[in-house]
Amino acid sequence: MAAPLTQTLVVQEHDEADETGLSIPVRLVKPDGTPFAEGVATIAWSAIAGKPSTFTPPAPTAGARGGVLQQAAEAQLAASADSAAIVAKVNSTLTKLKAAGLLA
């Protein structure tokens, strides 16, 4: 059985008569022959076939962001913090950035 002929139709909106005689009226129908009507359809997620049951996000790399979690908030340093506290805070922040996949 040969494949059905498919023709692309372009809808042009204008109210003027076509002087060239190239406009051909068409009727749009569904494959079963019923009239095609424009509209918006809402499809339930459960009605979609072939979808994955889970999605594993890609691992982040230096060039591509993957599925990462937001890290816990990092408290601000006190104005009177000594150098040991500053070093600890910087190291803690770097550890969180690495855990989030933002740094290697």
Image (cartoon, rainbow, N blue to C red):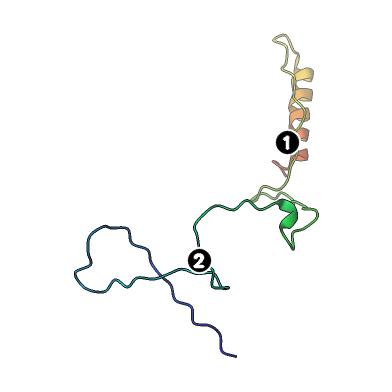
Q: Quadrant of the C terminus?
A: top right
Residue at the disc numbered 1: 97
Which quadrant of the figure has residue 88? top right
Q: Quadrant of the N terminus?
A: bottom right
Q: Is residue 83 left or right of residue 63?
A: right
Count neighbours of disc 2 (C-alpha within 10 A) and say few if under 14, some if 14 to 19, many if 20 or more: few
Q: Amino acid at mark 2?
A: Pro
Which quadrant of the figure has residue 98? top right
Looking at the image, the residue that sits furthest to the top is 80
Nearest the viewer among 13 and 68 is 13
The kind of secondary structure element at disc 1 is: helix
Q: Is residue 70 visible?
A: yes
Q: Earlier in the sequence, mark 2 or mark 1?
A: 2
Nearest the viewer among 55 and 32 is 32
Q: Is residue 9 left or right of residue 23?
A: right
Q: Position of residue 84 (x, y in %)?
A: 79, 19
Instruction: Say which of marks 2 and 1 sits in front.
Output: 2
Question: Residue 35 — which label?
Answer: 2
| Above or below for 4 versus 35 | below
Q: Position of residue 31 (x, y in %)?
A: 56, 73
Question: Residue 37 — which label?
Answer: none
Nearest the viewer among 64 and 21 is 21
Q: Position of residue 58 (x, y in %)?
A: 73, 53
Q: Residue at x 26, y 57 (%)?
A: 15
Q: Residue at x 74, y 63 (%)?
A: 50
Q: Position of residue 57 (x, y in %)?
A: 74, 51
The kind of secondary structure element at disc 2 is: loop
| Above or below for 27 versus 88 | below
Q: Amino acid at mark 1?
A: Leu
